[in-house]
Image (spheres, grey):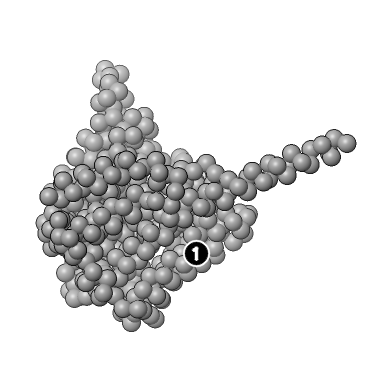
Amino acid sequence: MIVIAFGAVLLVAILISGIANRTVLSTAVLFLVAGFLLGPGVIGVVDIEAGDPAVATISELALFVVLFTDGQRIAVRDLTRAWRLPGRALLLGMPLTFAITTVLAVWLLGLSWPEAMLVAAVLAPTDPVLISAIAGRNEIPGRVRHLLSVESGLNDGLALPVVLVLLSVVGGGETHFGELTLELVGGIVLGVAVPLAIAPLSRLRVLRVTPIYAALTPVAIACIIFGIGTLTGANLYLAAFAAGVTIASAMPDMRDAFIEFGDFVAEIVKLLALFVFGALIAPSVLADVDVFGYIFAILALVLARPLAVEISLLGSGLPWEERATAAWFGPKGFASVLYGLLVLESGTDDSDHLFHLIVVVISLSIIAHSSTDTPVARWFAKREREDRMAAAAREPSAEE
């Protein structure tokens, strides 16, 4: 039944996509709300629970695919060309967001420091899908769009090791940091080594790769990495992200051939994960979070990220409206959904409650950020028209 329900919602999203692009209506919100309404907590058409194997499988495959495709948007050479503003957001803004969110969780919710840090790490990444709604609008200044695109593409992979380490700490058992380090490093090495080994083969003159099979080269690499990672215990998610970056850097032609197909696949799995995530949000989940939890969620959106990014961009030369746009658009979306599911599946003592807190923040973020991209873009477009009119009005007087 979940396949039929998802297909029906996808059809609705397709039919209203043009309207959504012009208004505050959001397809991300559509899938989240549809999952919620059709889930077991409301209508019950989609009968799925957090402990179902399907949830774990969808989460694992979706996170692997998304990190793999996101990584391919970031080539090393691209980062070295225009790193100044994204570097500020990632290297200063992201840690500050993490720190402020942690303090808020301890102060308002009474969580232990490891639990608060875990929640903050899950909520630290920004979502490339929701970011694309603002980054894809030409009305927004190019440097802001570039900043948000690079930041959202990289911060998933940067947050993941922290989430995994904190999950191990919060689990309460003995943490084997040596084994954990080997798993994380092994994932990075695997993700770099496989594409680098295959890249020379794809360039051999005797082996002429046809365009359609060039687009499938990253698919073959992903399958090999997934299989080796599963057999060896190397971290699949870091391997996927490292492989994506390596393909973009060492095999740009293959990346370019694959990227459109990869975007389609990534979009489908993202929407499916949002739909499943919505189905897991029963009214009892929302009721489990008290008023301080909702205050925390609001402050995590309107204080933690905006303050951190505003501080990180001081002295950057960006005007206040561009800094404010970059600071506001830090939507918590797909990566946070899947990292939250990792928390839920971990089975730690307080995993259910931590997941419910994460659910509230992500839900409010999707609604708030998805409904403000169009008004912000219109504001910039209006300002640009006014600037052009003012410049045109000054030209005659300048000639006189």
Q: Position of residue 363 (x, y in %)?
A: 33, 62
Residue, far right: 400
Q: Position of residue 382 (x, y in %)?
A: 60, 47
Q: Position of residue 353 (x, y in %)?
A: 24, 73
Q: Residue at x 52, y 49 (%)?
A: 377
Q: Secondary structure at mark 1?
A: helix
| Three-letter amino acid code of the residue under disc 1 | Pro
Q: Position of residue 79 (x, y in %)?
A: 47, 45
Q: Quadrant of residue 203?
A: top left
Residue situated in front as seen by the camera: 118 or 172: 118
- 43 on left or right of 304: left
Q: Quadrant of residue 44?
A: bottom left
Q: Residue at x 31, y 41 (%)?
A: 14
Residue situated in front as seen by the camera: 331 or 25: 25
The residue tagged 1 is 306
Q: Is residue 325 visible?
A: yes
Q: Residue at x 18, y 49 (%)?
A: 5
Q: Is residue 383 above or below residue 216?
A: below
Q: Is residue 348 above or below residue 370?
A: below
Q: Quadrant of residue 267?
A: top left
Q: Is residue 393 above or below residue 307?
A: above
Q: Residue at x 40, y 44 (%)?
A: 19
